[in-house]
Structures are given as structure tokens and as C-alpha cells.
Amino acid sequence: MNSKAFACLFFAVFIFSSSAASAFNITKLLSRYPDFSTFNDFLTQTKLYEQINRRQTITVLALDNSAVGDISGKPADVLKSILSAHVVLDYYDIEKLTDLSKKSTLLTTLYQSSGTAQNQQGFLNVTKQSGEIVFGSAVKGASHNAKLVKAVAAQPYNISVLQVSSPIIAPGIDASNPNGTVHNATTPSASPAATPKKAPASSPAKSPVADTPDSSEAPAADAPADAPEADAPEADAPEADTPASSPPAPSDADADAPAPGKSSSSRVALPIGAGIVMGLLSAMVA
């Protein structure tokens, strides 16, 4: 009887432990909400769902498909560390968060139990700001911009799934993003707008400079055209035709007008011949 009673008790404890251990399944729970399909896939890829399901009391800060851009494409180990910091080791629903007495409360996350957390990386700060509840890493200087959006699902005092507006990346947890910077949705649209404004400004500045050399080169091309005209004056031709020995003669020749060069030579010969004839005649008379 005692052995049977012990066996029944052991079986009851085993059943109770098994049922408690499988009180919830995070992947099945999130599969009911298509907006969180990517976040659910990340839990499966990193096998983080196994650690979550082993917990008795947990709160998951989930991201919908539109908010996972900053953590998509990360190495599996980095992604797992980031997601571990979205799992709080206690049960919090909206009512409990709203009733927090302190303006800022420190929460312990699953990443703290990993043994790799440093400098408060395994803790979150939850703060009330202007009527909103905001989460952020407890690391000094970290930004607090993950706002509580809504409650997604809950099994009271076992698991609570709350949606936050952006990832919580503790500084130093990701080597490629040492400051844990989360980009706003408006930032990408602002950068392209600034680029086109600079490009047109540089183009007009270059075009006037390109035109100036062209206009300055035009006169230089005209200058050589004037030079040949100066090198070949028409006045050179008469100088070539006129002998060097006859510069004073042209004025005399112009006075004698029609007579060519031959008539002038014959005119010189006539007085000489006449002198000879007159000499002979005078000799004969004598």
C-alpha cells in the first residue's frame, strides 16, 4: 500500500510539473497574430522560444512586422541577445505598469541570465513620460524610445505579450551598432531629399566655368588669321619689280612719261654721235 501510494504521489507530482512547465507556448501564441510573424520567426531561428517556454512567469515585449527593420539581418547570436533583452522575468500587463509607484522602475530581462550581460545590459528601465509608458536599456546614456503600444495576449500571471514601438538595443550588445541607435521611420526619407538639392547646385556651378575657357579661346583663333594678311602685303610686289639702282630714276622717268628704257639709252647715244660728226666737219673745214 505504501509503495502504491508513493507511486501515485510521484505520478501526480510529475503530471503537475509537466503541466506547469508547458503552461504556455510563445510561438503558438504569436502564431494567432500575423502582424508579429517576423518576430515569431526570430524566436524560432534563435531557439529563444525554448528558454521562454521553460519559464513560469514572463513578459515578452514584441515587435510587429513594421518595426523589425533595425534588427533584421543580424547574426543569430546578436539577434538572440537583442531579443533576450525584450523578455522580462516577471509578469507585467498594462494595468500593472500603469500602477507602478515609481516614475522609473528597473526590470530584469532574460539576457541578464545569459552570463554575457555587462554594464546593466540585462536590465530595462520602464518610465512614465507624459502619460505614456516607455522602455529603454538601463545602460547609462541609452535612449528610451520604445513606447508601449498595446497588449497583444495574456495568460494572467504566466505570460504577457505587449507590443512596443521599436527595438530595444542595449549599447555594446551589437558590435555593428555600439551605441544601440534605433533609426526613426522618417530618417530614410529625409536623407534622399537632401542629396538631390546638393547635386543640382554643383552642376550649374561647373557649367559657367566650362563656358569661360571656350569664349577666351575664340579670340586666340582669330589672331592667327590676321597674321597672314600682315605677312603678305601688296606693297612688296612693286619693290620686287623695281631695281635697287633706280630709286631716283622713277621721278625722271615719270617726267619723260612715254619713253621706255630703250629710248633713254638712244637719247644718250645721239649727242655723242653728233659730236663726232661735228668734229669731223670742223676738221675738214680747217
Image (cartoon, helix red, strand yellow):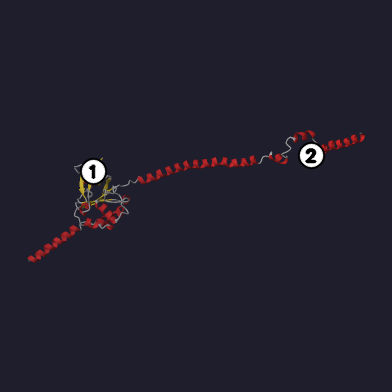
* Furthest-left residue in this view: 2
User: Which sits in the foreground, 194 or 271?
Assistant: 271
Q: Label 1 belongs to which residue?
A: 127
Mark 1 or 2 closer to N-term?
Answer: 1
Q: Secondary structure at mark 1?
A: strand
Residue 211: % across, % down: 52, 41
The residue drawn where x is 60% and y is 42% is: 224
- Nearest to the observer: residue 204 or residue 84: 204
**Residue type, mark 2 in image:** Gly
User: What percent of the width, then of the height, locates residue 177?
Assistant: 30, 49
Residue at (88% x, 35% y) in the render:
279
The percent coordinates of residue 129 (x first, y second) are: 25, 41
Alpha carbon of mark 1 to alpha carbon of mark 2: how far? 126 Å
Please state the horizontal and vertical placement of residue 59, each as a whole percent of the image. Answer: 22, 51
Question: Which residue is at 72% across, 41% downward?
Answer: 241
Question: Quadrant location of the N terminus?
Answer: bottom left
Q: Can residue 78 be seen here? A: yes
Residue 246 against residue 75 in the figure, above or below: above
- Say above or below: 273 vs 111: above
Q: Which mark is residue 171?
A: none
Mark 2 sits on what residue? 261
Q: Which mark lies nearer to you, 1 or 2?
A: 2
Q: Is residue 32 visible?
A: no
Amino acid tagged 1: Thr
